[in-house]
Image: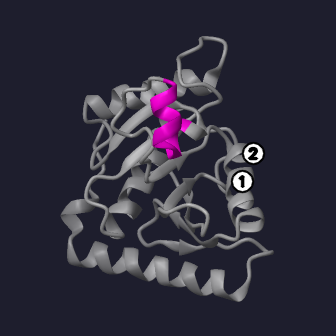
Amino acid sequence: MGKVLSHCALVAAPTYGRRVLVTDAAMNMAPDATQKKGICQNAIHLALALGIAQPKVAVIAAVEVMNTRMQATIDAAILAKMADRRQIVGGIVDGPLDLDAAVSSESARIKHIDSPVAGVADILLAHDIETGNALYKVFAFMSGAQTAGVIMGARVPIVLTSRADDALSRLYSTALACQHAHALAQQPELFVTPTE
């Protein structure tokens, strides 16, 4: 597993037709690009454990173009290039993408964004803990989403829930951790982390 520990939340909102992973909403406060590489790889591993064959990662920023005054866009471009060069494996990584372009094909079409991730992201990688935590809580408390959260990057997944999570979310978090542990035991070759 990777050296970076990170939080991954699985979110299923009734108002959105697809489940998504949100990372990192609870562990890393202000990760740099190197830490985000580990966060991204951890989320890809969890998506693979859930049976998503080639997870699509949207590295979220406020805009979908690189702006040297916006660190989120710089980090997103770095991560996308790392994935191109197989420093991140198992998924497709693109960014910067703003949230609407990441989750709405129509928004991506209107904005003329040509990306294999736009509109169909499986993973939303947030710039920092404030962004990730707010995104997770909007899903959970304003969108009626069912959520499950685990810490990835350790030898085994660790269940981590919010103090405000209900019993069902805690149960789903335990099930998510079990699903990852089972997939790791059955197909360890899927969970390779590239070396530097």
Q: Residue at x 64, y 48 (%)?
A: 28
Image quarter in which the N terminus is found? bottom left
Residue 1 included in the magenta stretch of the image: no
Residue reaching furthest right?
164
Tell me the element at label 2: helix
Picture colour scheme: one colour
Distance between mark 2 and mark 1 Cα atoms:
5 Å
Q: Which residues are magenta?
A: 101-111
Horizontal relation, residue 32 to residue 142: left or right:
left
In the picture, residue 15 is in which quadrant?
bottom right
Q: Is residue 110 above or below residue 99?
A: above
Q: Residue at x 58, y 39 (%)?
A: 100
Q: Is residue 108 above or below residue 66?
A: below
In the picture, residue 155 is in which quadrant?
bottom left
Residue 137 image point, x, y percent: 74, 60
Alpha-carbon neighbours of circle 1 within 10 Å: few (<14), some, or many (≥20)? Answer: some
- Residue at which label 1 appears: 133
Count the marks: how many? 2
Horizontal relation, residue 143 to residue 76: left or right:
right
Residue 123 image point, x, y percent: 47, 51
Residue 110 included in the magenta stretch of the image: yes
Q: Is residue 108 above or below residue 140?
A: above
Disc 2 + disc 1, Cβ < 8 Å = yes
- Residue at which label 2 appears: 130
- Which amino acid type is marked by label 2? Glu
